[in-house]
Image (cartoon, rainbow, N blue to C red):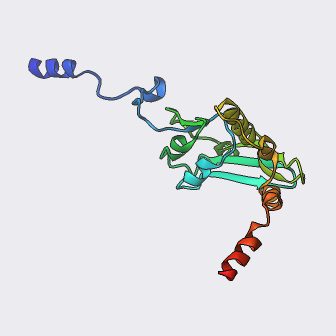
Amino acid sequence: MIKLFKTILRAGTPTAKYPFAPYEVNRDFRGKPEYQADKCIACAACTKACPANALIMETDLETGERRWELSIARCIFCGRCEEVCPTRAIALSPNFELAVTNKADLYEEARFPLAPCSLCGTYFAPARLVALVEDTLAQAAQPLAHPQRLHHCPDCKRKQSMLSQPASGAATLTQQESM
């Protein structure tokens, strides 16, 4: 009998006092995604990588805003959003206590302004993304030939490149026909 008590004392407490004391989780534990909107460039990489469609990004061209939303109820805590985020704006935390009394508390939302085209005024990309590209290219060794094109929408860029191209296509066709 004394041998049994010695074994019990050596084993220690087999259960955690969880509700009354904080529960220590493993370093690799994947809990609630923590989102930092000030780091986000609204590139939508996380929304494309999410297999559970817990992340939504909607673009409203009339108001010039892009809305990002995370649904904790749909999240499967896979970590794909953390892996693909280029600015580390989203990371999985060790927080696992996610019970709420109000369903609206299961959603996180952020809004980002879109950059307008400097030629036609239509919104074409998130303003933070355009600023990041501009800063990255400014730090590069070689400057851009046309830096103002960063602030043009794809349609205006296409029209400008079509207008700046010489009409060499017609000359090439007449040369090939004469041969």
Q: Is residue 41 visible?
A: yes
* Front-lying residue, 59 or 158: 158
- 37 up-or-down from 13: above or below: below
Residue visible at 64% across and 32% down in the picture: 140
Question: Where is residue 27 shown, x and y percent of the image?
Answer: 41, 29
**Viewer-proximal residue, 165 or 99?**
165
Q: Quadrant of residue 38?
A: top right
Residue 87 appears at what percent x and percent y? 61, 36
In the displayed structure, would residue 104 be above or below residue 158?
above
Residue 150 in picture, x, y percent from top left: 77, 44
Quadrant assignment, res 173: bottom right
As drawn, the residue found furthest toward the front would be 179
Left or right position of 49 against 22: right
Locate residue 1, reporting x and y percent.
9, 21
Q: Give me the residue at 15% from left, 21% from top.
A: 7
Q: Is residue 155 above or below residue 32?
A: below
Give the residue drawn at x 55%, y 52%: 49
Q: Is residue 37 visible?
A: no
100 sits left or right of 172 in the view: left
In the image, 12 versus 63, the foreground residue is 63
- Check the picture and name the quadrant holding the C terminus: bottom right
Number of numbered tags placed on the structure image: 0
